[in-house]
Image (tube, rainbow, N blue to C red):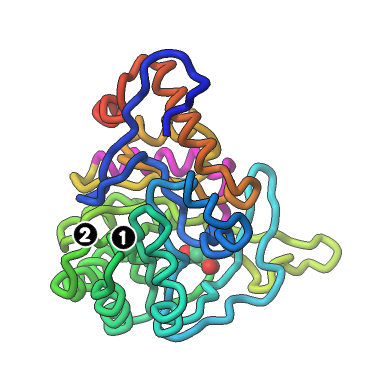
Amino acid sequence: MNDPGRSGPAIDLSTDLCGIPLAGPVLNGSGTFDALAARKAFGDELLNDFPFAGFVSKTITVEPRAGNPPHRLWETPSGMINSIGLPNPGLSAFCERDLGPLTELGVPLIVSVMADSAPGFAELVEAVGGRDGVSGIELNVSCPNVHSGLIVGEQPDEITALLESLRGLTDLPLIVKLTPNVANPELIAAAAEAAGADAVSLINTIKATAIDPDSNRSWLGAGGGGLSGPAVRPVALAQVRAVSAAVSIPVVGMGGVTDGSSALEFILAGARVVAVGTENFRDPRAGQVVRDGLEEALHRRGFSSLAEAQASTLS
Ligand code: SIN
């Protein structure tokens, strides 16, 4: 929605992500906005101005997961460490209970999945890909909080093998969520593209910990977690820039997007769309703030549409 308070012509924010039509370029980062809880809290008013142009679900695994012991969240200067550990109801309960309501949000739904083996990923992709109302699947190969989540995302050969095993199972777009915890994420992205990925999203969180100086123990129940928020934005921008220069598939850019200006930084670094993550914990309307602020930032820079900015990436 264009900001009615801003003077000047409306900026066209519409776009698409590997064939998924989007009214604007602002998504949520997986696991950072509980749309079903928000709908309970705010009622159908939430749907009248949903904060995101597309919704990415919390990551689902085949079996239910309880997640990590507390503390699971730790505030840091300009950021946050999470050690959540992918708590989720498991595939069956997700499909029976949550998937239907998530398809009623009024925006395209992308389901995030993670498994510790290729057959596990295959089961998730087949089950979710066969359901009405799902527009895309994000493969989370980059969670730092579960041992098996990270390995595939660190190795180009493993990514190739995984994508090749999944590509024939669905016609839906497959979006690979990349880890920043490697020297060259562009090599992982290129392997994903060559094996049939339709898009990549980055960055997931940066491995981190927080120490209690009185006990010399980590404040986090699992001993460590992943850093996100504005503190990681410069790293995210560098990786988005490197990855988008290395691949032709679209890039979902995230890592400390808090406002229109930071969203524009990601678009100019080569991201087709952006995702808001940590900021949702501070402000549940962060998606609207970023969208409206991006419109303002585009106008300020003299762009007449998002498409113009997308075509004008950094050299
Ligand atoms: C978590 O649930 O541990 C966070 C999700 C992720 O880092 O992928």
Q: Is residue 216 left or right of residue 283?
A: right
Mark 2 sits on what residue? 197
Q: Residue at x 30, y 25 (%)?
A: 305
Instruction: Point out the image quarter for the N terminus.
Output: top left
Residue 277, magenta (yes or no): no
Instruction: Point out the image quarter for the C terminus.
Output: top left
Is label 2 within 8 A of ligand 1 (CB to nearest ligand atom)?
no
Predominant secondary structure in magenta?
Answer: helix
Q: Secondary structure at mark 2?
A: loop
Q: Is residue 37 above or below residue 115?
A: above
**Depth check: 13 or 31 in front?**
13
Q: Residue 121 at x, y = what percent?
A: 31, 77
Q: Amino acid at mark 2?
A: Ala
Q: Are marks 2 and 1 in contact (CB under 8 Å)?
A: yes
Residue 152 makes an appearance in the image: yes
Q: Residue at x 65, y 70 (%)?
A: 223
Q: Amino acid at mark 1?
A: Val
Q: Residue at x 71, y 68 (%)?
A: 71
Mark 1 sits on what residue? 176
Q: Residue 119 at x, y = what percent?
A: 27, 84
Give the magenta part as a residue range. 227-245
